[in-house]
Image: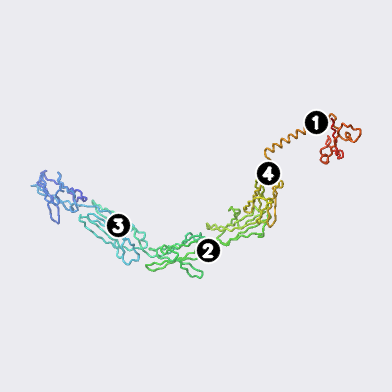
């Protein structure tokens, strides 16, 4: 028979009974017993093929196989006993042996619960850390404790472990233990767990619990105070946080102070969150710079700690632009602009025009050959490269003075009689000029920068078409005026008539020229003085008609009456012309 048979609770236990009888004789009977309180209790009697169950506790759970092995079904923890097999073989006598039946139940995974209120390093007694519970196991298991993976053993005034055992009605065990241990501030990161140990089939087995962390209370030893964002990057207008941190748990009470010029300390605690240790400073100014102090108070031992930090608020002030020369500027002059500012950090300078375009770098800007058009508002932009976003600007007006200059007029302008037209005149000057027209109409005036412009709406009449219009612009330094010429724009019909008239005139002149040339060739028309006749002579025939043509425009005729070779004739020879018209 095996010395030990192990079976899980609820399973079937099979206990073999093997024997040998000399001569292969058969046995007379077999009896099974179990030991209870040092007494034998008969379990069953086997004779031949007949099995007699004599124990009511096992009724319906016993079976004997052909090999005489005893099987017990639905075993319970109460079946953990010593079973005896006894064989009677007649003349060969009687023999017996025994087997210990071990019933086991694997324990459930241990449940661990950390102390909820936390543990203080200054506790006068050994504080409780956690509890561990393992349910429904058999036989009785064992529980051990671990911190950071190392087993804890009971130690006087340092570690204490209390265990409790409960036997359930089912016969299973529930085991619980409580761990007490002193802690230090380093234990704020420690993890604890428990392990339940049990035996199974001759081997030691273990089931671990989850890891837990315990809240540890300890006083602060160090305090830190820093500026967010970094103090080197703080500029005027920023929102700043002073963050005070202490290494105690729970956090102490925080108080904030600022040192004044007389070395007294101004209490700023009303501006801070005393629990979080944050002092908020909004829209800091240059005056916000100074020494700040954070003070902590531990309510357990009333211990105070403090830490100081210097807050530097970077700024740019006193931005000033100097113009040389400072006297009024005329067109063609030059000017130098110089920019200066004060700051605790290095500065860069940029110059920009009124449109925001960068025109130069450095703290000086030189402008030459100034005109009304180049005059403008310039700004000096001061930048602190080491402090992002810290910049200031100062604007200066560069004004060029002079009498007005007309820059645009609508001339010449082609118009028609009785047409309504717009006359435009645009000028530039400083001081601002006034603009006037010499004709009546409806004027619309507008100003753009240093330019002044006027649109005059008028109806074209004969006088306006003949004389035109005059635009006059003036200021305290002088005046300018320009004439707008209006030209008659003929209609397509009138242009056609003129062209026809010109063609007709050309044809008439051509025909007349041909007739005169023909008569001259025939000798009908005398030329020069030789051909001149006096109509007063008596010899003149009464049937002849002589017409004398005199010209008052000698200069014009002198230019027209030239010889064939191009030379001019004397004016005396050109004063009279005689044309003999004969029938």
Mark 3: few/some/many CA within 10 Å (<14, 14-19, 20+): many
Q: Earlier in the sequence, mark 4 or mark 1?
A: 4
Element type where label 2 sits in the image: helix
The first of marks 1 and 2 along the sequence is 2
Tags 3 and 2 touching, CB below 8 Å: no
Between residues 82 and 360, which one lies in front from this camera angle? 360
Whether residue 350 is visible? yes
Query: From mark 1 to mark 3, how far is it between C-alphas?
Result: 145 Å
Q: Locate the C terminus and report the quarter of the image it occupies.
A: top right
Q: Are marks 1 and 2 in contact (CB under 8 Å)?
A: no
Residue 414 in sight in this render: no
**Badge 1: few (under 14), some or many (20 or more) residues near its Cα, within 10 Å?**
few
Q: Which residue is mark 4?
A: 417
Instruction: Measure the C-alpha gap from mark 3 to mark 4.
Output: 112 Å
Disc 3 from disc 2: Cα separation: 58 Å
398 or 339: nearer the viewer: 398
Q: Which residue is mark 2?
A: 286
Q: Position of residue 428 (x, y in %)?
A: 66, 53
Residue 515 image label: 1
Quote the CA–CA distance across marks 4 and 1: 43 Å
State which tag comes first along the sequence, 3 or 4: 3
Residue occupied by mark 3: 112
Which residue is more in the foreground, 193 or 95? 193
């Amino acid at each position: 028979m095996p010395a030990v048979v192990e079976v899980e609770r609820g399973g079937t236990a099979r206990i073999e009974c093997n024997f040998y009888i000399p001569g292969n004789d058969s046995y007379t009977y077999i009896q099974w017993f179990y030991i209870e309180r040092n007494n034998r209790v008969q379990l069953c009697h086997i004779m031949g093929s007949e099995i007699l169950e004599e124990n009511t506790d096992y009724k319906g759970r016993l079976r004997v196989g052909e090999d005489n092995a005893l099987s017990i079904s639905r075993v319970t923890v109460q079946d953990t006993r010593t079973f005896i097999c006894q064989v009677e073989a007649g003349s060969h006598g009687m023999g017996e042996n025994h087997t210990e039946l071990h019933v086991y139940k694997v324990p459930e995974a241990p449940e661990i619960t950390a102390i909820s209120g936390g543990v203080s390093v200054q506790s006068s007694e050994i504080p409780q850390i956690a509890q561990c519970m393992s349910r429904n196991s058999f036989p009785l298991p064992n529980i051990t404790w671990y911190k950071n993976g190392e087993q804890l053993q009971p130690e006087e005034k340092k570690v204490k472990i209390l265990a409790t055992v409960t036997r359930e009605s089912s016969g299973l065990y529930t085991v619980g233990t409580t761990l007490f241990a002193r802690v230090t501030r380093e234990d704020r990161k420690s993890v604890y767990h428990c392990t339940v140990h049990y035996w199974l089939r001759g081997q030691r087995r273990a089931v671990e619990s989850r890891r837990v962390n315990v809240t540890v209370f300890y006083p602060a030893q160090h305090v830190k105070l820093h500026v967010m964002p970094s103090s080197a990057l703080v500029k005027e207008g920023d929102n700043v946080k002073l963050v005070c941190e202490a290494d105690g748990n729970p956090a102490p009470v925080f108080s904030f102070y600022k040192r004044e010029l007389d070395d007294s300390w101004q209490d700023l605690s009303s501006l801070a969150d005393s629990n979080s240790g944050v002092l908020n400073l909004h829209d800091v100014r240059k005056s916000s710079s100074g020494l700040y102090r954070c003070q902590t108070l531990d309510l357990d031992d009333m211990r105070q700690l403090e830490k100081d930090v210097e807050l530097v608020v970077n700024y740019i002030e006193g931005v000033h632009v100097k113009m040389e020369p400072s006297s009024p500027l005329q067109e063609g002059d030059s000017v130098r602009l110089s920019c200066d500012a004060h700051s605790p950090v290095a500065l860069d300078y940029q110059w920009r025009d009124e449109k925001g375009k960068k025109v130069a770098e450095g703290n000086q800007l030189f402008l030459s050959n100034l005109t009304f058009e180049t005059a403008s508002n310039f700004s000096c932009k001061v930048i602190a490269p080491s402090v992002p976003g810290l910049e200031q600007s100062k604007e200066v007006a560069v004004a060029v003075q002079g009498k007005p200059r007309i820059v645009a007029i609508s001339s010449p302008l082609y118009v028609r009689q009785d047409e309504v037209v717009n006359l435009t005149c645009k000028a530039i000057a400083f001081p601002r000029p006034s603009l006037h027209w010499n004709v009546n109409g409806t004027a619309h005036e507008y100003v753009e920068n240093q330019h002044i412009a006027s649109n005059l709406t008028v109806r074209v009449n004969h006088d306006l078409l003949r004389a035109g219009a005059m635009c006059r612009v003036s200021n305290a330094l002088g005046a300018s005026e320009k004439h707008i010429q209006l030209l008659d724009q003929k209609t397509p019909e009138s242009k056609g008539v003129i062209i026809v008239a010109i063609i007709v005139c050309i044809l008439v002149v051509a025909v007349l020229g041909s007739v005169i040339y023909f008569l001259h060739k025939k000798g009908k028309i005398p030329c020069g003085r030789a051909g001149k006749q006096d109509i007063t002579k008596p010899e003149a025939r009464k049937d002849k008609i002589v017409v004398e043509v005199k010209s008052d425009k000698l200069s014009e005729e002198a230019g027209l009456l030239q010889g064939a070779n191009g030379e001019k004739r004397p004016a005396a020879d050109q004063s009279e012309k005689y044309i003999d018209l004969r029938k």
